Amino acid sequence: MELQNETADRRRKRNIQVAFIAFIGLLAILMLFGNTLQSLTLPKVRTEKAMNGSLVHTLEGSGILRPVGEEKLSNPDGWKVRKILVKEGDHVKKGQKLILYDSKSAERELQDEVTHLEKQKIELQNTQDQFIQATMEGDELQFRNVKREIETRKLDLGVQERKIDELKDRLTSRKELTAPFDGMITKINAVEGLASGEGDVLIANDRLGYWFELTADAKLLSGLGISIGEKIEVQVNTSQEQQTRLVDGTINEMANAEPRTDNSSSMDSGKIRTIPQKVLRIKVIDAELKGGEQAWVKLEKRSNQEGFVISNAAIHQDREGMFVYKIEEQRGALGNVFVARKFKLDSSETNDKETMIQSGSLFEGELIVVESSEPLQDGDRVRLQ
């Protein structure tokens, strides 16, 4: 009887022990399951490691080549265009004939003035004959009158001769349009048979070259150390086959431009940040250029200083300034947890893709939040993507 009681007692204790172990296991499973469910509700973040290095500043842009020196040529008297001797794209030499004008009306006017001059000479000869007669007759009054008339007619002859010389010069200079310098014909507005207008021919000065403009962030240009007069390599399409060749360019002008707005900054601070801009005018000189070609530049330069380089997407801004969230790993009984910690940026340098942070409180390899499924606050638990 005692043996049976002892056996039943051992069985009861074993059952209690098994039930207790099962209860503890179930409790652990429930805790793990609950922790897993809780972790699934945490914001999901994408991170990158802070890597030590330097920034690469890149300036890239393009524009259309335009003549530095371009002049409009036309006939100031509006004569009809008789013949056009050149076409757009032609290279011409100084003094080369470009357009011939109908000068018949000017030639007739000149001939009329020459005839009038001959008539004045005959009249002067008649007056001189009267002077001789007055001298022979001894008529003092007539002598003085005829003498004054001779002087007057001589003055009229001088005026007429100068008028004829002016008409000759005008006829010579305006019956044809010539190139004032070596250059290229960029546009022809003249039409044969029609009167001359403003800008019959547009000619670009080969000696002065061509230019194009591009706009860039003022901070980027400062990082590149670009200055006026600096030489720069320019790529240009020089033919219809879009063949690319390199030509030497010079930064000829650098001026302030309208600032651009950074709408992404308003997501954190509620304010739209403006970024100062500058416009660069780059000049190129090359004998094969005609104007209208596509030109572009690409400059790369590493920053002189080094720091921790992270993506611009990780940068946030509030009233206190710029900051990032870095991941802090904390050990726990049921596993490690990850917490987002706000890290203020004291100084930084940036380009269009990355930012370089110079700070002793950030270490290489630390995880930086680049993207989050929900807005974060300092101390929020997160789950890594």
Image (cartoon, helix red, strand yellow):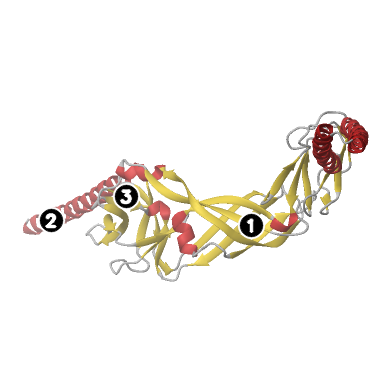
CA separation, marks 2 and 1?
97 Å
Using the numbered discs, state the Cα–Cα distance from disc 3 to disc 2 in whole angstroms.
64 Å
The image quadrant of residue 289 is: bottom right
The reply to whether dot 3 and dot 2 touch (C-beta < 8 Å) is no
Horizontal side, residue 106 vs residue 327: left or right:
right
Q: CA distance from mark 1 to mark 3?
A: 39 Å
Outermost residue to the top: 194
Question: Is residue 229 visible in this depiction of the protein?
Answer: yes
Q: Residues within 10 Å of mark 3 (few under 14, many from 20)?
A: some
Q: What residue is drawn where x is 76% and y is 32%? A: 197
Which mark is in front, 1 or 3? Answer: 1
Question: Badge 1, how many Cα within 10 Å: few under 14, some, many 20+?
Answer: many
Determine the secondary structure under disc 3. Answer: strand
Question: 250 above or below 173?
Answer: below
Q: Amino acid at mark 3?
A: Gln
Give the number of the disc on residue 361.
Answer: none
Q: Label 3, on which residue?
A: 317
> Mark on residue 283?
1
Secondary structure category for the residue under label 2: helix
The answer to which of 311 and 283 lies nearer the viewer is 283
| Residue at x 79%, y 55% (from the top left corner) | 182
Query: Considering only order in the chain, which callout, 2 or 3, is on the residue closer to the N terminus?
Result: 2
The residue identified by callout 2 is 13
Return the disc, 1 or 3, that comes first in the chain's sequence. Answer: 1
Residue type (three-letter) at the residue carrying disc 1: Lys
- Tell me residue 220's x, y (percent): 47, 58
Cβ atoms under marks 1 and 3 closer than 8 Å: no
Which x, y percent locates residue 75? 79, 37
Characterize the local packing of mark 2: few (<14), some (14-19) or many (20 or more) Cα atoms within 10 angstroms: few
The three-letter amino acid code for the residue at tag 2 is Lys
Across and down, in percent, residue 133 comes to 93, 35
For the N terminus, the image quarter is: bottom left
